[in-house]
Amino acid sequence: QVQLVESGGGLVQAGGSLRLSCVASGRAFSGTAMGWFRQAPGKEREFVAGISQNAISTNYGDSVKGRFTISRDNAKNTVWLQMNSLNPEDTAVYYCARSLYNTPWRTTPREWGYWGQGTQVTVSS
């Protein structure tokens, strides 16, 4: 059993930054890749970023490359998403997830599991 709890969302003006956190409990956190997805109202869940179990490899969705950074600390069972240069199109509920295939390179939601409850990010123009 794996529990993921996200935090750090909120309301920010365009151009601003936020840092999301995801704390994992239960099954070994360090043993698999972790990632972030987001879902805006009326849209499908979208891959944002993934990080390998040893933090050597990272992968980003095209819409966030160069603006967002994913990182992790296995000793703290935590993965972060640093979001810079936010724009209104980044408004969504952001979810942390655990890879079912231990790779940050699979980007469809069905290839990830143990979803957290999500944290709302709202970017005003």
Image (tube, rainbow, N blue to C red):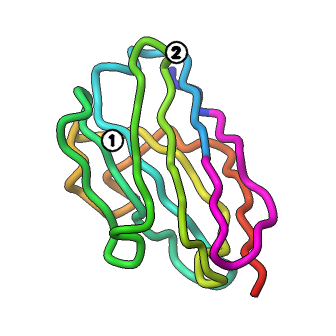
Q: Secondary structure at mark 1?
A: strand
Query: Which corner quadrant of the image does residue 85 belong to?
Result: bottom right
Q: Is residue 34 left or right of residue 55?
A: right
Q: Is residue 45 left or right of residue 19?
A: left
Q: What residue type is disc 2 on?
A: Gly
Pinpoint residue 117: horizontal percent, then vertical percent: 68, 45
The front one of 83 and 22 is 83
Pinpoint residue 61: horizontal percent, then vertical percent: 34, 69
Q: Cα distance, mark 1 to mark 2?
A: 15 Å
Queried whether the magenta region covers residue 17, the answer comes back as yes
Above or below residue 123? Residue 112 is above
Q: Residue at x 61, y 80 (%)?
A: 87
Tell me, for residue 26, which label it has, or none: 2
Quadrant of the rendering where the C terminus is positioned = bottom right
The front one of 57 and 43 is 57
Q: Secondary structure at mark 2?
A: strand
Q: Residue at x 50, y 16 (%)?
A: 76
The part of the chain drawn in magenta is 5-19
Query: Which corner quadrant of the image does residue 60 belong to?
Result: bottom left
Magenta span: predominant SS is: strand
Above or below residue 78? Residue 35 is below
Q: Residue at x 37, y 56 (%)?
A: 49
Tell me, for residue 99, which label it has, or none: 1
